Image (cartoon, helix red, strand yellow):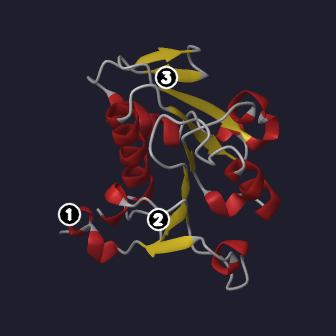
């Protein structure tokens, strides 16, 4: 819930699996696309092929019934909203289509897979120049890594912890 109104330029929701990190981050991106007409956003992962059976399945559930049109068939390239917003899909293995323009918001799935230079490249696209929302934002989700992981060391990167206790419905007997 905390990330739904966060306007920090960079943040990550971190925690163990099954704490709804991805669902929360995708809900954030979807809400931004609905709220700001013409928004240019992206869903990014280190390897594009890792997305279709994981994060994009969740994305389809979140956007179902909202008038979002999918382009690209079984390997979507982008999603268009009735208000002119567009969410691009891509991987850092072939980042040209996703990062070749200015973006208002970029969500990185499994951010721990990225290197610090990958993250820094992405943040150069969310500086606010796209101009469709009042601030640019790069955000992601990750599973906890080693204590010296760049995510835990990056100045200015806000890390919010997600815990099983935050989602008790997933664990009730």
* Dots 3, 2 in contact, CB < 8 A: no
Measure the C-alpha gap from mark 1 to mark 3: 30 Å
Q: Quadrant of residue 32?
A: top left
Mark with earlier residue (1, 2): 2
Give the left or right position of residue 34, taking residue 97 as reference.
Answer: left
SS at badge 2: loop
Measure the C-alpha gap from mark 1 to mark 2: 14 Å
* Residue 78 in the image: above or below residue 51: above
Say few, some or many: other residues with alpha carbon within 10 Å of mark 1 (under 14 / 14 to 19 / 20 or more).
few
Give the position of the C terminus as an image quadrant.
bottom left
SS at badge 3: strand
Give the left or right position of residue 158, taking residue 66 as reference.
Answer: right
**Which mark is nearer the camera, 3 or 2?**
3
Residue corresponding to mark 3 = 79
Position of residue 57 measured from the top left corner of the image (x, y, whole percent): 45, 35
Residue corresponding to mark 2 = 17
Position of residue 76 measured from the top left corner of the image (x, y, whole percent): 57, 22
**Residue shown at 45% from the left, 46% from the top:** 134
**Residue shown at 72% from the left, 77% from the top:** 149
Residue corresponding to mark 1 = 169
**Residue shown at 48% from the left, 34% from the top:** 132
Position of residue 79 measured from the top left corner of the image (x, y, whole percent): 49, 22
Number of marks? 3
Mark with earlier residue (1, 3): 3
Give the position of the N terminus as an image quadrant.
bottom left
**Which mark is nearer the camera, 1 or 3?**
3
Q: Quadrant of residue 60?
A: top left
Mark with earlier residue (3, 2): 2
């Amino acid at each position: 819930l905390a990330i739904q109104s966060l306007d920090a330029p960079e943040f990550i929701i971190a925690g163990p699996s099954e704490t709804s990190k991805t669902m929360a981050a995708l809900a954030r991106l979807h809400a931004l696309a609905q709220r700001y007409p013409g928004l240019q956003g992206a869903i990014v992962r280190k390897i594009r092929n890792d997305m279709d059976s994981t994060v994009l399945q969740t994305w389809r559930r979140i956007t179902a019934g909202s008038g979002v049109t999918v382009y690209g068939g079984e390997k979507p390239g982008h999603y268009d909203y009735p208000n002119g917003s567009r969410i691009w899909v891509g991987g850092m293995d072939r980042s040209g289509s996703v990062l070749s323009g200015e973006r208002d918001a970029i969500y990185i799935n499994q951010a721990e897979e990225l290197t610090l230079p990958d993250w820094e490249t992405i943040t150069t696209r969310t500086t606010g120049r796209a101009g469709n929302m009042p601030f640019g934002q790069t955000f992601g989700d990750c599973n906890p890594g080693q204590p010296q992981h760049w995510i835990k060391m990056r100045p200015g990167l806000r890390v919010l912890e997600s815990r099983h206790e935050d989602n008790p419905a997933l664990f009730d007997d």
